[in-house]
């Protein structure tokens, strides 16, 4: 290798906050919806009638620490 030759330096792309905010809001809405469906959809505030959703996410509720019975 010749003396004085330098290796290429990798540059990290900078993402402006303005482009990041819509994705963060979208992810937050999706995560809150999932949290509601797994942890809170039961009883008087239930959006879906019946117990099918409850039974579908039953083990996930216990894994996340939500009591359900």
Image (cartoon, grey):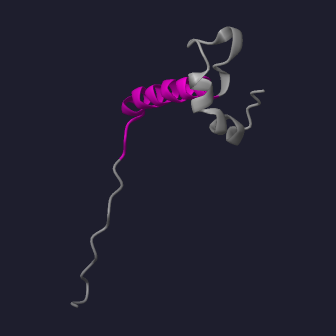
Instruction: Tell me: residue 65, above or below residue 36.
Output: below
On the image, which quarter does residue 58 sit in? top right
Looking at the rendered image, the quarter that the C terminus falls into is: top right
Q: How many marks?
A: 0
Does 67 appear in magenta? no
Q: Residue at x 56, y 13 (%)?
A: 48
Q: Residue at x 70, y 13 (%)?
A: 43
On the image, which quarter does residue 39 sit in? top right
Range covered by the magenta-colored residues: 14-38
Instruction: Tell me: residue 48, above or below residue 2.
Output: above
Q: Nearer the viewer, residue 16 or 31?
A: 31
Does 26 appear in magenta? yes
Q: Residue at x 36, y 31 (%)?
A: 19
Q: Position of residue 18 (x, y in %)?
A: 39, 29
Indicate left or right for 56 with 19 as reference: right
Q: Residue at x 52, y 28 (%)?
A: 28
Indicate left or right for 24 with 19 as reference: right
Looking at the rendered image, the quarter that the N terminus falls into is: bottom left
On the image, which quarter does residue 16 sit in? top left
Q: Position of residue 65 (x, y in %)?
A: 74, 37
Q: Nearer the viewer, residue 4 or 19?
A: 19
- Considering the whole magenta stretch, tell me its main secondary structure: helix
């Amino acid at each position: 290798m010749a003396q004085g030759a330098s290796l290429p330096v990798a540059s990290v792309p900078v993402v402006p906050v303005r482009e990041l905010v819509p994705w963060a809001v979208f992810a937050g809405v999706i995560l809150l919806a999932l949290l509601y469906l797994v942890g809170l959809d039961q009883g008087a505030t239930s959006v879906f009638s019946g117990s099918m959703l409850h039974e579908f996410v039953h083990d996930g509720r216990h894994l996340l620490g939500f009591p359900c019975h």
